Amino acid sequence: MRKWIASGWFAAAVAACSVALLATMVLGTLAELEGLAGGLPPFDLRAGGYTLVEARDFLAALGRDGVFLYADVQLRVDAIYPATYAVSRGLLLWWLTQPGRPWARATPLALRVVLGLGLPVAAAAFDYAENHYIALMLRDPPAVAADLVAAASFSTQAKSVLTIVVEVGWIALAIAALMRARRRRHG
């Protein structure tokens, strides 16, 4: 069982589920929310964050139907996504840092734990925090408070930065592992 969980195929399968959920949100509910808000991107897609004025403008443009869609559809789908993201990227990074994969020496255990557990879990935690704050903003859109928007915006930015670090990390490790495998095959 342990060997099966640590296999690259299992990591790839869980990653495929995560990507499918992300595609469902980006191409489905988030795109629909952007349309309902007259082209303004939803909070989840504002990697650089947002100000109080921008948040209020988006919420006003979203309207009643948009608030319902965000709260009752998007946030429900996004309740599953961060966990699948953390598990999929954690498994992928753990698999990619197994001894002999990216380099001849074993990857230090502490580095494997930070890469495979710490970063993906932190990204998911900030995604969940973002969802929590968005849900609070959707309760009373016209009266959304500055401190609530600041907390939501910070969570969005932290999630975005950590996600970029995780994605660049696994891609770099995958390239290193492929190059090492190619050198062993041809060397």
Image (cartoon, rainbow, N blue to C red):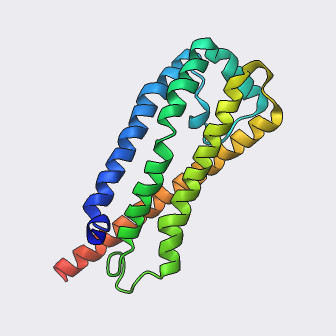
Residue that sits furthest to the left in the current view: 186
Quarter of image, res 89: bottom left
Spot occupied by residue 154 in the image (x, y as percentages of width and height): 71, 45
Q: Nearer the viewer, residue 164 or 146?
A: 146
The quadrant where residue 139 appears = top right
Q: Is residue 17 above or below residue 180?
A: above
Quadrant the C terminus occupies: bottom left
Determine the residue positioned at 70% across, 39% down: 152
Q: Nearer the viewer, residue 180 or 67?
A: 67
Give how far across and how far down residue 75 sits, in percent: 54, 32
Question: At which x and y percent is residue 43?
Answer: 62, 33
| Relative horizontal placement of residue 132, taking residue 180 as reference (left or right) | right
Residue at x 53% of width, y 21% of height: 69
Whether residue 29 sits left or right of residue 53 in the image: it is: left
Q: Say left or right for 4 vs 119.
A: left
Q: Residue at x 41, y 29 (%)?
A: 27
Q: Where the N terminus falls, by quadrant?
A: bottom left
Q: x and y percent of residue 144 in the render?
A: 78, 26
Q: Which residue reaches farthest top?
A: 64
Residue 91 position (above or below residue 78)? below
> Toward the viewer: 57 or 13?
13
